[in-house]
Amino acid sequence: AGLFGGAAALGGAAALEAAEADAVPAVRELAAQRPQQPRGVLLAEASDAFSIADIYERARRGVVQINSTSLVQRFESDPVFGFPFGAREELRQGLGSRFVVDKAGHVVTNFRVVEGAEQITVSFSNRDAVAARVVGVDPSTDLAVLRVEQSARALSPLPLGDSDGLRVGDAVVAIGNPFGLERTVTAGIVSALARPLAAPDGAEIGEVIQTDAAINSGN
């Protein structure tokens, strides 16, 4: 969840690159004054022109909610001796916040949210819910790509940022649906870089971005 909270935050930060033309000269002026500074620093300083409300308004339509239904086996044990004596099938619900990456209808999500899913739906900001199918997975990085059949006009892709420009202390905005509460925004900073994180299959994910922006189940 923290990984994708950070990803959504990066998407929001990258929206700065799509600023109106009247904001571009300000960024160029900074670059002219201090040509040796990294690009990430310039973006951080230029971000003063964009409030959290501005970033939310620009990025919220690209953030979607994922609901998945999986059929899993639950093993039951003898309450006295603890011996397993059978299994029964039950439905498991998955919930997550993900983002649209292109006009073709591709959505990036966590692998654990859709693993073994019998049914997946994607809910957009206008509350339209459409069926989705898995088109690619990488369990070792806990990533999956979904595809929805939706008109291009209904899709609002978020541009991907460049994490090489991040510094500890940079501002972060996370947009998601924690605990199913729609379109929630939280803010914080980049707390650390290059943190290790264990994937569901036991592999180690490197270069994870740590943030103190509030991230909960469903983000």
Image (spheres, rainbow, N blue to C red):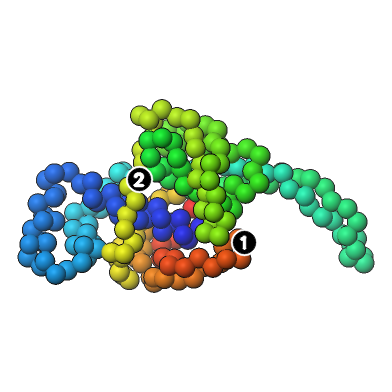
Q: Image height check: is 140 above or below 19?
A: below
Within 10 Å of disc 1 (Cα), the crowding (few <14, some 14-19, many 20+) is: few
Identify the mark at residue 159; answer none if there is no mark. none
Identify the mark at residue 201; answer none if there is no mark. 1
Q: Residue at x 45, y 40 (%)?
A: 106
Q: Image height check: is 15 above or below 2?
A: above
Image location (x, y in percent) of residue 140 = 55, 60
Judge left or right: residue 91 versus residue 149: right
Q: On the image, which quarter does residue 102 sit in?
A: top left
Judge left or right: residue 88 versus residue 123: right
Within 10 Å of disc 2 (Cα), the crowding (few <14, some 14-19, many 20+) is: many
Residue type at tag 2: Leu
Judged by depth in the image, the label closer to the viewer, 1 or 2, is 1
Looking at this view, name the residue that lies furthest to the right: 81
Residue type at tag 1: Asp
- In depth, the one of 165 and 60 nearer the eye is 165
Image location (x, y in percent) of residue 214 = 44, 60
Per the image, label 1 sits on a secondary structure element best described as loop
Label 1, label 2: how far apart the Cα atoms are: 28 Å
- In depth, the one of 217 and 86 nearer the eye is 86
Q: Image height check: is 71 above or below 172?
A: above
Residue 120 visible in the current orientation: yes
Per the image, label 2 sits on a secondary structure element best described as loop
Image location (x, y in percent) of residue 173 = 35, 56
Image location (x, y in percent) of residue 151 = 41, 27
Q: Label 2 belongs to which residue?
A: 158
